[in-house]
Image (cartoon, rainbow, N blue to C red):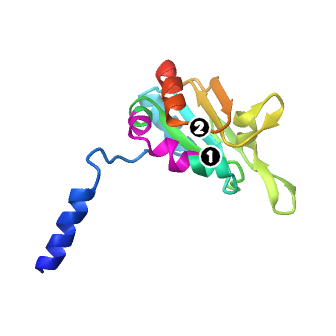
Amino acid sequence: MKKSLYILFIFFWTMPSGFAQLKTHTFEEAEKLSKENPKPFVIFINTSWCNYCKMMENSTFKNPEIISLLNSDFYFISLDAESKSDIHFNNHTFKFQPKGQNTGIHELATQLATIDSQVVYPTLTVLQSDFSIVFQKHSFLKAKELIIILEKLK
């Protein structure tokens, strides 16, 4: 009994004091919440095979300042560009568009991640509460870079 209490004590003692989790919403949830409390949407468009996407997930989006900013001033949505699920957003239903055997891209990813006729991963897109695009960036963003962007957009 003493040993398990000691292990539990060590676990809580070593946990970071500012430990917080990033609130991730679906498009449907964010749209509903936005009606009551309008805030911009930050959408991270990624794929499972994108190394830079994974790096952002494991570094940029784990930064406590980023987590705090996103949780308080934005609705954060992570969109897998190869998701096969229909997404209902802004009075439209967006679907997966196959491009070949076991390949394709989601219509919503195409809408949100196309810059200069190209879709590149990762892409960060920010929508105002009226669903207009106010920011798009193709590339890996470090925490410091993203903090500057979010501060300007909030």
**Front residue (pair 102, 36):** 102
- Name the residue at 46% across, 26% down: 38
Q: Is residue 153 above or below residue 61?
A: above
Find numbered disc 2 in the image and state the secondary structure of the residue it sits on: strand
Q: Residues within 10 Å of mark 1 (few under 14, many from 20)?
A: many
Find numbered disc 1 in the image and state the secondary structure of the residue it sits on: strand
Q: Position of residue 62 (x, y in %)?
A: 45, 46
Q: Position of residue 27 (x, y in %)?
A: 57, 42
Residue placed under numbered mark 1 in the picture: 79
Residue found at the far left of this picture:
2
Type of secondary structure dominating the magenta stretch: helix
In this rendering, the count of numbered labels is 2
Identity, as a three-letter code, of the amino acid under mark 2: Ile
- Name the residue at 60% across, 51% down: 54
Residue 146 appears left or right of 82: left
**Front residue (pair 103, 66):** 66
- The part of the chain drawn in magenta is 56-68
Residue found at the far right of this picture:
100
- The mark that comes first in sequence, 2 or 1, is 2
State if disc 1 and disc 2 touch (CB < 8 Å): yes
Residue 143 appears left or right of 51: left
The answer to which quarter of the image holds residue 107 is top right
In magenta segment, residue 13: no
Residue found at the far bottom of this picture:
1
Residue 27: mark: none
Residue 43: mark: 2
Residue 20 appears left or right of 110: left
Identity, as a three-letter code, of the amino acid under mark 1: Leu
Q: Position of residue 115 (x, y in %)?
A: 77, 29
